[in-house]
Amino acid sequence: MEKITFITDENESLTFFVEEQTRVNGTDYLLVSDSEGDEAQAYILKDVSQDTDPEAKYEFVEDDVEWEAVAKLFDQMLEDVDLQA
């Protein structure tokens, strides 16, 4: 499983495990977890970077409608993963 590390605006380092990725209407999404195992918390991250950005920029999906739609896609991709907000 791939691990990725993000640096927040407050210069805090966050590490996640990439469970799956998909593209919806031209936007890339990552399904990540904060640890390996059954007790891991899942998050959906959205690529908000511009073509001119030197690195990808992601933010947590907070809109309930968007989260539900993307979570449903990930749920179909990973039948055995329980996605709860």
Image: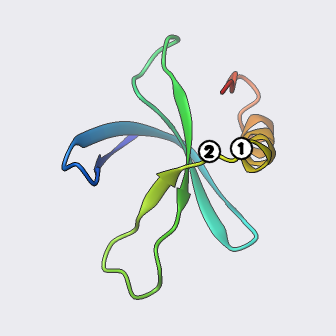
Q: Nearer the viewer, mark 2 or mark 1?
A: 2
Question: In the picture provided, is 69 more to the left or to the right than 84?
Answer: right
Quadrant holding the C terminus: top right
Rendered residue at 74%/48% (across/down)? 70
Asked if residue 11 is positioned above or below residue 79 in the image, the reply reads: below
Question: In the picture provided, is 71 more to the left or to the right than 20?
Answer: right
Q: Position of residue 55 (x, y in %)?
A: 33, 72
Rendered residue at 76%/35% (across/down)? 75
* Residue hosting label 2: 62
Q: Which mark is residue 67?
A: 1
Residue flagged by tag 2: what amino acid is it? Answer: Glu
Query: How dense is the environment of label 2, judged by Cα within 10 Å: few (below 14), some, or many (20 and up)?
Result: few
Tell which of 78 and 5 is nearer to you: 5
Number of numbered discs present? 2
Q: Position of residue 10 (x, y in %)?
A: 23, 49
Measure the C-alpha gap from mark 2 to mark 1: 7 Å
Residue contact at pointers 2 and 1, CB within 8 angstroms: yes
Q: Which mark is residue 75?
A: none
Asked if residue 20 is positioned above or below residue 58 in the image, the reply reads: above
